[in-house]
Amino acid sequence: MTTTQTRLATPGAKPRGKAAFRPDIQGMRAIAVVLVLLFHAGFPGLSGGFVGVDVFFVISGYLITSMIVTEVLETGRLRLGRFYARRARRLLPAASTVLVAVAVMTVLWLPVTRWREIAGDMASTALYVVNWRLAARSVDYLAEGDAASPVQHFWSLAVEEQFYILWPVLVLLVVWWARRRGVRVTRRVLGVAILAIAVPSLAWSVHATSATPQAAYFVTTTRLWELAVGALLAVGATRVARLPQRLLAVTGFVGLALIAYAAVRFDGSTPFPGVAALVPTLGAAAVLAAGLRDGRGLRVLALPGMATTGAMSYSLYLWHWPAIVLATTLWADDSGHLRIRVALAAILLSVVPAWLSYRFVEQPLHLSEALRRSVKRSAAVGVACTLVGLAAAGAVLLALLAPASGANVPHPGAAVIGTSAWTGVADATTDVSRIAPALADAKRDVADSYSDGCHQTETETAVKPCRYGPDDATVVVALVGDSHAEQWEPTLREVAEQQGWRLDTYIKSSCAVADVDQWLRTIPGPYDTCTTWADSVTKLLVADPPTVVVSSNDGIDGVVVDGVKQPRESLESDFAAGLARTWEELEAAGSTVVALADTPRSSTDIPECVAKHEKSWATECETPREKGAARSAVGAQERAAKQADVPLIDLTDAICPAPACPAIIGNVLVWRDSHHMTATYARTLAPRLTDALVPIVAAS
């Protein structure tokens, strides 16, 4: 993504006193950044515009390796300090400026529910490891549905920065190895070393894209080969430059066609990076190769405006995404989407700070003679910029301490329903700064089974139950299901502790324990790990029958029969039948099965809504009862309960009291997102669950 080193000696020519300018590289940068910007704006026809990042990777790999190889072959060494100093003064000042702006933007305009995560993102961005943080979050169930971070786009810059740190060290290791064995360091030797890295990285990328697609998108190990493609072109440049110019030109146009194809034909369903990333990556390499002989490349890349846009591509990339995130927060429609014209306006406005940053931060520090002459000064600038970024992150965290505490305010939650304090509607006078959990903590107000390591992710198959209560308890209750079952764990623990029961939990993300293969939209093909896990759980419960409390998300993505996803029309009946078969099997083995009806859901993220509408949350953040109580697959558990003849406990009246589903009840925030209760509110439902569940257990 960087814009340094567009002046390189033409590899196929003899060295000259002054490096030749490569207008085609600036043109490639312009195309790449425009693809990314339009993709982020949701521009029609560019569903694969994200491949602009892959073009940047190839350019960076080529330019940095060209510089390193030239120095190594000419001098036999590489001055690491000088190399890192150049990168520091080129990249870090502009990045730290954006981080400061993001900190201000976050505190002034973004919901407090996002501040803690954004601060963590900013800190990891300042240290250039945010891509690994995003990869971990992509497989973190609690982060599902989180709004996009205003520094999320730094992931690609983190990949490049890690490349800049490691790549010259690897080259030096090759030089050291060659000298120890008396081997002359040549382009061929360096090429073999690069292949030794690129091939395993590509293989891993293909595997990871299939096994863990969300994380694979961000991590360096699946992207390193893309930079290595550019590096291979750099070490093989002298050979490529000997090819006929006409052939190279044709190759360049083929490369442009490959990039255009990926930008138009790829979309969010394309497994990426993996094999698909070869298309834009090889395309970018082909376009670069077209300019190796004449130092100019394709003329189409030198059209008016290309050079200016390419030169500013780094700043444009840095500033456009925070602008889109802010616009989405302020002007998204009811579904949470930003209209294209608004997104385009946000990007156009971001050009202003991008130009200012480029003109008064980027260029002055990058071209400063005082800094260029002193590695120590450049290093000091880099350290200072990193500290500024970390300080900006710390400032956001400090801002979280400002709201008043609700420690001395009663939080009856569901207990207020039916009392004189409950009028049947939300109490609009509630001070949201004094509710529990605090808005900033809402998304992490979850069952203990998450932190206790008992929530199985989508890729896991091992059964890892949590056990709460005495081992010698006469009554053992097993809570079984997905996260919609897990949200009842705080409630059941309260009941179990009062009754002297032991509570065991068997929970897997988006996986109902049912005799039917399920489909999960985030995993290619049937949700096989769910089937394996559910079968294992069923066998354990059959072998030692407890009282089984089951619940799950009625709105599952789909069911699979003979490897084929079934039509939406049959989802409810197929899912209900699978649940009923499993419940009947458990009861036949001696268990008493009790079903908990699925909870209502909203069309919006409730904590964020309350944070945005602190004075008008009662009207802005409520969901009409008839809408909130509706499921994506209406009544699958109710239907299964009738088929299997098991009791169904439905506490919807205590979660969504008429005439609407309030965001806050009894000074307690009901929801941690759009469809999961906060653990705090779940605990206030314990008396109602006691009244419904204890008689059933006593009669069993």
Image: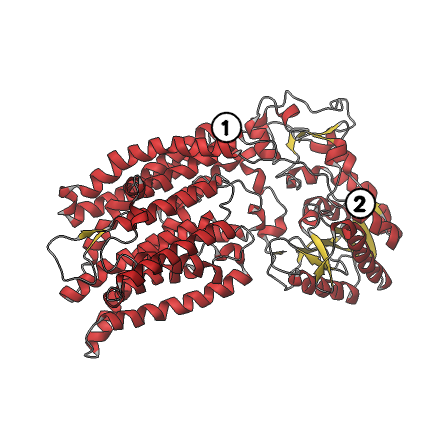
Q: Secondary structure at mark 1?
A: loop
Quarter-of-image position of residue 38: top left
Q: Residue 354 appears at what percent x and percent y?
A: 33, 35
Horizontal side, residue 582 vs residue 489: left or right = right
Q: Which mark is residue 635?
A: 2
Q: Is residue 264 left or right of residue 197?
A: right
**Of label 1 and label 2, which has the lower sequence position?**
1
Residue beneath label 1, please? 403
Residue 482 % position (x, y) = 68, 52
Eyeballing the image, is 384 above or below 479? Answer: above
Outermost residue on the bottom side: it is 181
Q: Residues within 10 Å of mark 2 (few under 14, many from 20)?
A: some
Left or right of 151 in this view: 436? right
369 w.r.t. 285: above or below? above
Viewer-nearest residue: 190 or 501: 190
User: Circle 2 sits in a helix, a strand or a loop, which is it?
Assistant: loop
Q: Position of residue 276 (x, y in %)?
A: 48, 60
The image quarter in which residue 529 lies: bottom right
Residue 437 seen in render: no
Q: Mark 1 near mark 2, Cβ–Cβ under 8 Å? A: no
Whether 242 is drawn above or below 283: the answer is below
Question: Residue drawn 22% across and 48% down?
Answer: 379
Label 1 or label 2, whichever lies nearer to me, is 2
Q: What is the crowding at mark 1: few (fewer than 14 residues within 10 Å), some, or many (at least 20)?
A: some
